[in-house]
Amino acid sequence: MAFAGLLALLGLTVAASRLRIGPWGVALAIAIASAKAGLVMAFFMQLRRRGALVTVFALGGVLWLGILFALAFADYATR
Amino acid sequence: MSETPQVVQMQFEDAEQQSEAAQLGMWTFLASEALFFGGIFLGYAAMRALHPDAFAEASGSLDVVLGTLNTALLLLSSLFMALADLAVHHGSKRRQIVLLGLVAALGLAFLGIKLYEYHHEWTLGNVPVLQWSREGARDDGAMLFYVLYFAMTGLHAIHMIVGIGAMFVVIFMIHFGKAGSHRPLPVEMLALYWHFVDIVWIFLFPMLYLIGGGSG
């Protein structure tokens, strides 16, 4: 079930890459990849089952990654 | 459905607390790994923003078909890994070993394809320093792209090799009764690690292969 969804997203990723929508292409690719990662985390890694504390730890990692990218690009964007 | 009674280490109150402690530890490790890969992803993102055309052109030499196949293989391996995780709680020893073996086989197939791709880049003269045949300044985007390509996929491949090695270790552990329904944590933790390596590739694939229409 979740796997079917993942494959569908994969197909979507490749198809979407062929649309030449310029700078939005990157955002779209990342959005689709994030959706796939979310599915893997929720179902395969059982975050849905395991309870709040484990989810906090997992999302904490994502949050820190976000801080890394946000601050780095804030620098580039304001040069 | 009754579960096999599990071995609980003496510092834990019950199996559930023991399992949660292991998961928290594993997720913390995975968070550190995410930042580890995150650093090189950031480098890639910044360089791509600075050299969009060179990156798009260089990305064209990567085979999207093989990349897509590899992505599908890893997603499938994650499915089998999740099933193995399930089998550790509700399945037979044989089922656990077969599923883990399938995960390892898919992982090896992925690495085989990767090796073929590396060879292809070698014949095209796209390997920086070792086999480079493009003209142009050293600071142009193409060499940057390939350095990042080999570094990122190489780092990922090393993680896969470690994961496959651990897979065989766990298979032996189950075979000799050191892990399994009575002691599911090795399988559960390996599963989390393997899914993480899959997620890294899920981001690597579009970033490297699908820039600018994915030609080639």
Image: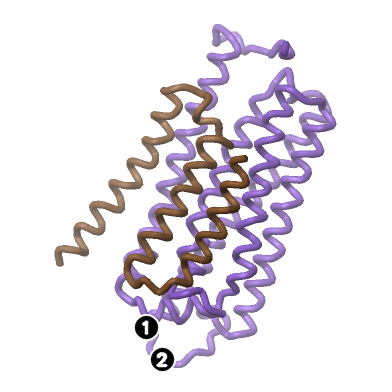
Same chain for the residues at labels 2 and 1, yes or no?
yes
Amino acid at circle 2: Gly
Q: Which mark is residue B60?
A: none
Image-based side of B35 in relation to B196, left or right: left
Q: Which residue is outermost to the bottom?
A: B135
Res. B112 image quadrant: bottom right
Q: Which residue is mark 2?
A: B136
Identify the element where label 2 is drawn. loop
Q: Position of residue B166 (x, y in %)?
A: 68, 41
Q: Position of residue B201 (x, y in %)?
A: 54, 55
Identify the element where label 1 is drawn. loop
Residue at image point 21% right, 64% down: A76
Q: Are marks 2 and 1 in contact (CB under 8 Å)?
A: yes
Identify whether B72 is placed above or below B173.
below
For the rendered model, the colour scheme is: by chain
Identify whether B146 is placed above or below B93.
below
Image-based side of A26 in relation to B124, left or right: left
Chain B colour in the picture: purple
